[in-house]
Each structure stands twice: as C-alpha cells, then as structure tokens.
Image (tube, helix red, strand yellow):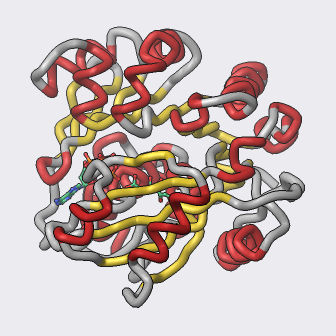
C-alpha cells in the first residue's frame, strides 16, 4: 500500500461542547488555546459541564489532517498510541470508518482526550489530557509505510516530551533516508516558548514544508508583517504555508509569494481550521495540483470547517466540487 501522507501525532478523542462565556469564565482556562491538563482536571471539567450536550469524535491535530486528506480522496496512514480502553477503541473505530488503519499496537492505560469548549464567538478552548498518547516511541514508526509515502507530516505537539519527540525525529529521519518529503506544523504558539531553537533547526534542516499561523510565524521570526514572516521562513524552508485566519493565507514556493484569499463564512466553531487547511494543501500537492490550486482547496475546506461544529467535515467535498474549486 502506498500513501500520499504518513502522519505522526497524538491520538485524542475530542469531546465537544457548546458553552456560554460565563461558564468558560467560571472554569478559568485561557481562552482560544490548548491547555494540557491531567485526567483529574479533565473529569472535573466534564462534571462542570454535565447536562450540556456533547459530541465525540476521533481527533488530535495531525489525525484531523490525515482524516481530511482521506476525505478528499487521498490516501494516508497514521502513527499514534491509544490504550485498549473504551476511548481507545472508539478512536480506532472512528478512524477505521474512514479507512485509516493505525498499525501501532495498543497499550495499557488511559487514552488521550481533548475537551473542546466552543463559545458563541466560535472560538475554541481546548483542554487536553494526553494519556498514553505520550508513550509513542521511535519503535512505533514503521519504516515500510514511510518508504511508500510521498510526505511525512509531523505535529509540533509531539515535541513537548519524550518519547514522542524521538518518535517524531525518527519519522523525519526515515523520511529523509527514503527521499520522502517532510511537512511540519508548529501546532500552537505556546510551544515556541520552549522549543523555538529546535523548531528553527528543523525548518532550516529536514523540513520541506512548514505550516504555521501568524502568531506562530511572528514568534519564530521576530517579524510582524505576514509577508515578511513568510519570506523569512522561506529563507530556510523550501515551502511555507502561513495561515491568517479569516484573512486567508500565504504560500511560499520557489521564491514566489502565493496569496490565497479567505472564503467568507459565518463562523460557528474554529476547531480544526488549521488542520483542515493542512489537509487541503497536502492532498493537493501530492495529487498533482499546483500550489495555488491546493491553496484554494485548503481555504474553502477550512472555511467549511469553521462554518460548522467540529473538526471533521459534516459535508465532505465531492469530486465535482473539488474540480470546480481549484479552477485553472
Ligand atoms: N473566520 C474564518 N473564516 C474563513 N476562513 C477561516 C476563518 N478562520 C480560519 N479560516 C481558514 O482556516 C485557515 C487556518 O486558520 P488559522 O490561521 O486561524 O489557523 P490556526 O490558528 O492553525 O487554526 P486552528 O488552530 O483554530 O485550527 C485560514 O488560513 C483560513 O483559510
Ligand atoms: O487546533 C484545533 O483547532 C483542533 C485540533 O488541532 C485539536 O488538536 C484537536 O482536534 C484536539 O483533539
């Protein structure tokens, strides 16, 4: 089996709940970002929102991107770690329904979860209990699958601890060994505080395509203007995808700035916008689309995710829609 993309990342089951501002204030977590919590805190939050309708689905940043790629008609594999508990079984089944098999064996313990609190302004505040997700090791990275992939996609979240950091580095090393391209997402601005030097050396080194949003690009480059940030990153990385929320994105490829317009939508929930954007780009460039066409597809898909609840497209794109979107 060959793959467009081999992803490596956390395995989380997302628990999504729409809450009001006052409930979020009471819970007192930093709005709009991801906070790592232990399972005890996670359970307290779930108790605090008991009575509110929640929905569950397989999630995690790179997992969302992998599901997006397959949703467009691409092929992908995913390396991550879940436990053999109910949450882990749910994760594997949900991925399996979309044709994504996780080859990594399950382990003892508790699977990871992410409680996503969505406020009426469409902002998402995430509380992540990583569980056994943080036990993914370099031995879990399958060389044979990487060898048969066009791209390896690694999420920055893996760099927060060992052994996931080593697992990510192993995937990158194997990609380079087999001439497979490497894409990397910075994942969250908070990571740059701790991992700026390592991320910069990856971008200057093995990474062929870097994804980041404007906050992350500013923190990495020290520049302010989006195009300046993109140029600075492109001095080191062959390809750059810099996302600008509702204002669209900027791609850098072969020295050229490729601006991609945002698509207007009434925002419902921004969860997974960046993940779906990455899915559009990776699907596009591994399936013969130009960077501009890939950008258009990514922008439309990310906007569709923002206009609905959850990181997974409730209404996937048809082949005809994709053709129409990418234009000439
Ligand atoms: N309000 C919006 N309206 C339309 N498109 C949007 C909106 N917000 C985000 N997008 C689309 O999603 C892409 C990614 O958004 P953003 O720059 O916020 O990344 P991000 O911070 O990684 O997202 P997130 O972490 O919320 O998934 C944008 O480039 C754009 O195409
Ligand atoms: O960043 C987001 O908006 C969503 C995902 O990246 C997130 O990691 C998730 O789905 C949590 O499981």
**Image location of residue 301, percent across then percent down:** 33, 64
Q: Is residue 189 visible?
A: yes
From what the image shows, is residue 16 above or below residue 160? Answer: below
Residue 140 found in image quarter: top right
Q: Quadrant of the N terminus?
A: bottom right
The residue depicted at 40 percent of the width and 90 percent of the height is 51
Foreground pick, 114 / 283? 114
Foreground pick, 281 / 314? 314
Q: Quadrant of the C terminus?
A: bottom left
Q: Is residue 69 visible?
A: no
Q: Give the side of residue 11 with respect to residue 93, left or right.
A: left
Q: Give the side of residue 236 with respect to residue 296, left or right.
A: right
Q: Give the side of residue 278 with respect to residue 13, left or right.
A: left
Q: Quadrant of ligand 2?
A: bottom left
**Image location of residue 147, percent across then percent down:** 79, 36
From what the image shows, is residue 170 above or below residue 66? Answer: above
The residue depicted at 28 percent of the width and 43 percent of the height is 292
The residue depicted at 39 percent of the width and 38 percent of the height is 188
The residue depicted at 69 percent of the width and 24 percent of the height is 169
Residue 12 found in image quarter: bottom right
Count of labels in the image:
0
Q: Give the side of residue 107 with respect to residue 114, left or right.
A: right
From what the image shows, is residue 247 above or below residue 52? Answer: above
């Amino acid at each position: 089996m060959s793959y467009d993309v081999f992803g490596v990342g956390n395995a989380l089951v997302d628990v999504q709940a729409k809450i009001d501002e006052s409930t979020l204030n009471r819970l007192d977590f930093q709005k709009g970002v991801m906070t790592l919590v232990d399972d005890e805190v996670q359970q307290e939050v779930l108790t605090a929102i008991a009575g509110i309708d929640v929905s569950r689905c397989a999630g995690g940043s790179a997992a969302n991107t992998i599901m997006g790629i397959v949703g467009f008609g691409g092929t992908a594999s995913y390396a991550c770690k879940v436990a053999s508990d109910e949450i882990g079984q749910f994760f594997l089944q949900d991925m399996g329904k979309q044709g994504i098999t996780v080859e990594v064996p399950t382990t003892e313990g508790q699977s990871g979860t992410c409680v996503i609190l969505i406020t009426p302004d469409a902002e998402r505040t995430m509380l992540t209990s990583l569980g056994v997700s943080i036990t993914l090791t370099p031995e879990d990275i399958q060389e044979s699958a990487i060898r048969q992939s066009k791209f390896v996609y690694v999420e920055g979240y893996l760099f927060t601890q060992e052994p996931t950091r080593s697992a990510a580095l192993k995937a990158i090393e194997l990609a380079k060994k087999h001439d497979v391209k490497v894409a990397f997402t910075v994942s969250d601005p908070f990571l740059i505080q701790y991992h700026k030097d390592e991320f910069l050396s990856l971008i200057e080194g093995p990474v062929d395509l870097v994804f980041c949003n404007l906050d992350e690009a500013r923190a990495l480059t020290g520049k302010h203007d989006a195009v300046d940030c993109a140029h600075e990153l492109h001095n080191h990385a062959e390809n750059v995808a810099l996302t600008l929320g509702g204002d669209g994105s900027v791609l850098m490829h072969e020295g050229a700035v490729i601006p991609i317009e945002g698509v207007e939508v009434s925002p419902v929930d921004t969860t997974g916008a960046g993940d779906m954007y990455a899915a559009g780009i990776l699907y596009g460039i591994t399936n013969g689309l130009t960077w501009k066409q890939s950008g258009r597809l990514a922008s439309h898909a990310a906007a569709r995710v923002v206009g609905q609840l959850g990181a997974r497209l409730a209404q996937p794109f048809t082949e005809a829609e994709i053709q129409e979107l990418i234009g000439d």
